[in-house]
Image (cartoon, coloured by chain):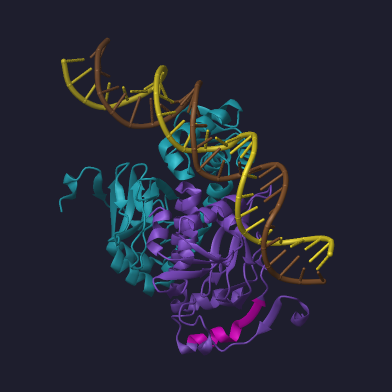
Chain colours: A purple, B cyan, C yellow, D brown
DNA sequence: CGTAGTCTTGATGTGGGTCAAGTTGCGTGG
DNA sequence: CCACGCAACTTGACCCACATCAAGACTACG
């Protein structure tokens, strides 16, 4: 397969020791010897924003760690309605190493670099490497917690609280500057709506309202400043 | 502690080999020798319906398998709004063996029997027993899938579809009788509403409507008959 | 300079929440 | 045995938050 001929799908190589997610990815608890074994079966791959990484219903041929960028997990109903069911960042793990087929699409929301493993060899290594399996279990429990937090948000929060909650979760990852946070939004309004179970228009209106009230300030439509995390947290419903 | 003095909290003992969830619980992949080690640290405990098993915010002292009954996981907002974020059945695992504090309450929705382990000894055994850890990872991935399915339901489905989806998921566990399913509802209307992000009244109205249309039939308020899973599936939005 | 994508804003409609009343079934006590 | 209280459930009337429909502003790009 001539990958150079495929737009938005490029390969590159990085040694694990200089990998930006070495400290927090699924491999973070591995010994030097274990890292060597992982190194032997890994591939780096780049995806353009919008590109599909895994298809719903298929048994994914690969799993991997996000080295850079944001990946969204999207579920669809037969009539076309869609709901984002996960949002993954650098260090997070994509795919299911057991035989199970994923029941959602994984799509690059921004330009993404993955550290990919063939599913089968990785699953075998997983079984032989407790450090790897323990870390994956821990990360999966973390994902489960995050999904449950989203259930509360989708089930019980108002549109205003949903938008504030989303911005707050991003602010938690953003660089702080004199008491506030500068947040670059990795998602379009349509994607935020898809994430929060709302429409584009409602998201836009709530962001405008939060801006009017001074809870957030806009640099441009895709970048906000949060002067007080506490204030935003209050708008998020506690 | 004199447990006999505590109403709704009784101890009993069952040998693992005659345990009803031996084939599907977290211990299902364990060897006879590993089961012996689990047996040494396990306790059976009964809970009356409504009793709290784990408190939100606490580092749970125990984890365990559901031997019998239904456990609900509930998250609360500071102002009192609450959302069920999980519904667990016989064989399912309750609690987080890693140090993380659970961020929800686990409550017995029906009379429940748990096979309990002290968290620390179990976590240690987990690290030394790949069969146990692999099974727990697999079960956790299953829970994550279920949570993501609920995200789609809460985010995008109508009240009618939500109720139908809930009944359909129960029908999947219920005994079949000539093409249909007889479903005993383990939850009150209030709990169903808490699960689906609705109010009691809306749940009641949608159930009435589904009954009028012949999608379901009532034995009594807590038991329904589903003549056609396909019909119900259609009402659930596919 | 035109076209397309993103975002905002306004007008209107509706699904489901809120409030209120009533029914049913059950356990408790007279 | 019935009277009472309580919890679960149902049903109706009304209302509002958010969806829908529509239009327009802004930017990026060929």
Please give the range of residues in magenta.
Answer: A34-46
The answer to whether residue A103 is seen in the rendering is: no
Q: In this view, does A148 lie to the left or right of B124?
A: right
Q: Quadrant of the C terminus of chain B?
A: top right
State the residue in front, A35 or B161.
B161
Identify the image quadrant of the N terminus of chain B. bottom left
Corner quadrant of residue A69: bottom right
Q: Quadrant of residue C28?
A: top left
Vertical comparison of D28 with A162: above or below: below
Quadrant location of residue C22?
top left
User: At 33% from the left edge and 60% from the top edge, which residue is drawn?
Assistant: B63
Which residue is pictured at 45% across the width and 59% down the height? A215
Q: Which of B54 and D1 is in front in this view?
A: B54
Q: Position of residue B20 (x, y in %)?
A: 40, 51
Residue at image location 69% in from the left, 47% down from the top = A79
- The answer to which of B31 and B165 lies nearer the viewer is B165
Tell me the chief SS of the magenta region: helix
A37 falls in the magenta region: yes
Residue B60 on the magenta segment: no
């Amino acid at each position: 397969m001539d990958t150079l001929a495929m737009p938005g799908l490029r390969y590159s190589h990085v040694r694990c020791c200089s990998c930006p997610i070495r400290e927090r990815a699924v491999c973070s608890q591995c010994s030097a010897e274990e890292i060597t074994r992982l190194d032997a079966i890994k591939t780096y791959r780049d995806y353009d924003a919008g590109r599909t990484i895994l298809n719903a219903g298929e048994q994914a041929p690969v799993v991997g760690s996000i080295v850079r960028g944001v990946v969204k997990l999207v579920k669809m109903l037969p009539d076309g309605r869609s709901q984002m069911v996960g949002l993954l960042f650098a260090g997070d793990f994509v795919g299911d190493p057991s035989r199970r087929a994923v029941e959602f699409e994984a799509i690059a929301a921004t330009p993404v670099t993955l550290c990919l493993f063939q599913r089968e060899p990785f699953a075998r290594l997983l079984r032989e490497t407790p450090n790897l399996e323990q870390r994956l279990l821990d990360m999966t429990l973390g994902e489960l917690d995050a999904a449950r937090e989203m259930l509360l948000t989708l089930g019980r929060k108002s549109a205003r609280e949903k938008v504030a909650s989303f911005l707050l979760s991003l602010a938690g990852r953003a660089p702080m500057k004199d008491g506030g946070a500068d947040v670059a939004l990795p998602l379009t309004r349509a994607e935020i709506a898809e994430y929060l179970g709302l429409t584009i228009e409602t998201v836009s209106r709530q962001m405008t309202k939060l801006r009017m009230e001074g809870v957030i300030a806009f640099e441009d439509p895709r970048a906000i400043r949060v002067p007080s995390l506490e204030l935003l947290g209050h708008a998020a419903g506690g």
